[in-house]
Amino acid sequence: MLLAGKVAVIFGGSGAIGRAVAHAMAREGANVYLGARDQEKLDRTADSIRMAGGAAETFITDVLNEHATAKDVERVAQQAGGIDVVVNATGFMHEQGKCLEKLSLPEFMSGITPFISAQFNISRAVAPHMGGERAGSIISIVAPAAPMAMPGHLGHIVGCAGMEAFIKALASELGPRNIRVLGVRSHAIVDAVQAGSYTGEIFSAKAQSMGLSVEQWLGGAAQSTLIKRLPTLAQIAETMTFLASDHAGGMTATVVNITGGATLG
């Protein structure tokens, strides 16, 4: 098993990506701790992991609250006896589609502030409980917009670029403490909307503006890739599980590209 005996803390553990990652990591032997704001959704995910033979616990947390996140993580670390793997699978509603003349400052910042704040709060909370003789990894999911230039996505592009820059900068600080920091840059995930992802609302608005259904819009997005298909939740989860394992122990300050070639570099 890739993660046998490791403690994996998954923020956004009740969302579509978080659930998929939790199942994959639990199947590979990790004891997973699922954090989010909705206890009912967390319980459903934990129950399904346990039914499959995995180990799962839950905790309520608000990653936009710095002090509360630190206290919540401290409790988890004490309960688990330390932390080996951290996954940031959080997501926030934000503006996509409006160009500069129609975009307000709050709408612009909606693609930046919550994402960077969550990344900072999570990293600051978990770092004291990781590393040393016990190698650690912090892995974040990132939308593919950082290297793109397209109208109507000012805040989204800047936010994604900031996330990728944060990952690399943090890796330089935490590397000497035996903590790796990685990102996974994913294109639109083909089955995420069906799994209840908040991106369904964003994609619906985009599709409607083009006179398309969400399925048709996703089909068009697939054609923008080199392989003419979008990644699946399972592929994202399996990649993040590998990155958390000792097999990827030489990787840090890296954003792994899972866009099917829609973005390069």
Image (tube, rainbow, N blue to C red):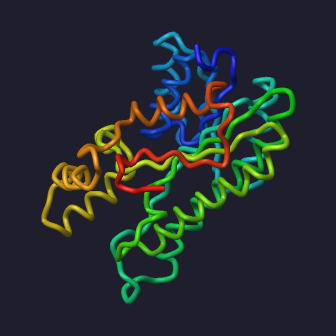
Q: Quadrant of residue 115?
A: bottom right
Name the spot of residue 3 as percent of width and height, x first: 62, 20
Residue drawn 19% across the image and 50% down it: 219
| Above or below for 194 versus 226 | above
Name the one closer to the observer, 63 or 160.
160
Q: Is residue 64 visible?
A: yes
Q: Is residue 238 left or right of residue 37?
A: left
| Above or below for 3 versus 87 | above
Q: Is residue 167 left or right of residue 81?
A: left
Q: Is residue 130 left or right of residue 245?
A: right
Name the spot of residue 183 as percent of width and height, x first: 57, 47
Name the one closer to the observer, 151 or 192.
151
Name the one closer to the observer, 62 or 133.
133
| Above or below for 52 versus 264 | above
Q: How many marks?
A: 0
Q: Is residue 40 visible?
A: no
Q: Residue furthest bottom?
A: 101
| Above or below for 251 versus 145 | above
Name the spot of residue 232 as percent of width and height, x first: 35, 37
Quadrant location, the N terminus = top right
Q: Is residue 81 left or right of residue 249?
A: right
Name the spot of residue 5 as percent of width and height, x first: 69, 16
Residue drawn 68% across the image and 31% down it: 249
Residue drawn 54% across the image and 36% down it: 13
Q: Quadrant of residue 131?
A: top right
Q: Residue furthest left?
A: 211
Residue drawn 77% across the image and 30% down it: 135
